[in-house]
Amino acid sequence: MFPLWDDQPTKKFPLITVAIIVLNTIVYLYEASLGEKFTQFIYAMGLIPFEITHHTDLLPTSPSIIYLTIFTSMFMHGSIIHLLGNMLFLWIFGNNVEEYLGRVNFIIFYLVCGISAAFTQIFFNPNSTMPMVGASGAIAGVLGAYLLLYPRARVTTVIIFGFFIRLIKIPAVVVLSFWIIYQFLYGISSLAVKTGESGVAWFAHIGGFIGGIILIKLFKLFIK
C-alpha cells in the first residue's frame, strides 16, 4: 500500500511545503557531491543518540555541534530513494496541513514534530551509534495531523500483491492507520532484536506521529 495523491483540494500555494522539499533536495545533492566523504558527513551532521545521551562527539576528526544535529538531521537523507519517498509523503499530506495551520505555524509545527521524533528515538535507543537522518520523523507528525483533520479524504493508493497491481481510492484514516500500525509492529520487533541496530528509526516515526496529533489538537484551540 503506497499513497500517490489525495483528493483534498487546497486554495493557497503550499509555499513552506515546497520550500522544505527544495531544501531537502539541495542538501541531498550536496551530500551526493561529496563522494567518498559522504559517510563522514552523515556521521558528522546526522543525529547519533549516543552522542546526545553521553554528551560526547564520537568523531572528533569531523567535529560537529552534536545538539544541532537534532535539526540538521531532519534535512538529510541516506539515498535518493529515501529522499523521494519522504518528499512524496510530504507533498501529498503537507499542503493541506500547511493551509490549515498557516505558513508560520506550519514551520513551527514541522520542526517541533521533528524534535519529538528525535527524542523518542533517543529514549528507546539511547546507546545507538548509528546516525539518524531523514525528514520522516517530522513528516510523520504531518501524517498525524492529517489523520485528525481530514480522515475522510480519499487517497489514491497503489496496491501491490504479487503480480496484482491496482490503483484504489482509500479513506485517509485507513491509509494512515495502516501506516502507524506498521511502524508500531516493526518498532516493537526491533526492541526484541539484540543482534544489531535497525537501519530504520521506527520510534522516530512513532514519536513524530504522536507529536503531530498532540500539536494539531493544541493548534486547533487557537485556529478558527
Image (cartoon, rainbow, N blue to C red):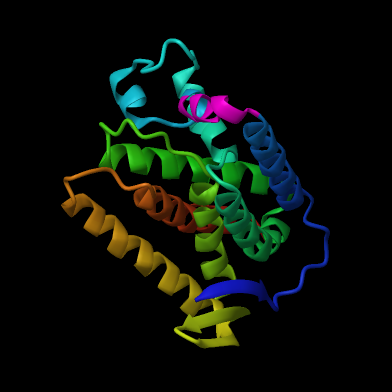
Residue at x 54% of width, y 32% of height: 71
Furthest toward the front, the residue is 36
Quadrant of residue 33 in the image? top right
Q: Is residue 44 found left or right of 158 in the rendered image?
A: left
Q: Is residue 21 visible?
A: yes
Furthest toward the top, the residue is 61
Helix, strand or loop: magenta stretch: helix
Q: What is the quadrant of the C terminus in the image?
A: bottom right
Q: Can residue 153 be seen in this view?
A: no
Q: Give the range drawn in magenta.
A: 34-43
**Position in image of residue 24 (x %, y %):** 66, 42
**Residue 128 position (above or below residue 157):** above
**Position in image of residue 183 (x %, y %):** 37, 61
Q: Is residue 28 magenta?
A: no
- Of 101 and 50, nearer the camera is 50
Residue at x 43% of width, y 45% of height: 117
**Residue 199 position (above or below residue 4):** above
Q: Is residue 115 found left or right of 3 in the rendered image?
A: left
- Of 45 and 172, nearer the camera is 45
**Position in image of residue 42 (x %, y %):** 50, 30
**Position in image of residue 74 (x %, y %):** 55, 39
Residue at x 57% of width, y 54% of height: 81
Residue at x 46% of width, y 27% of height: 43
Quadrant of residue 189 in the image? bottom left
Q: How many labels does the image show?
A: 0
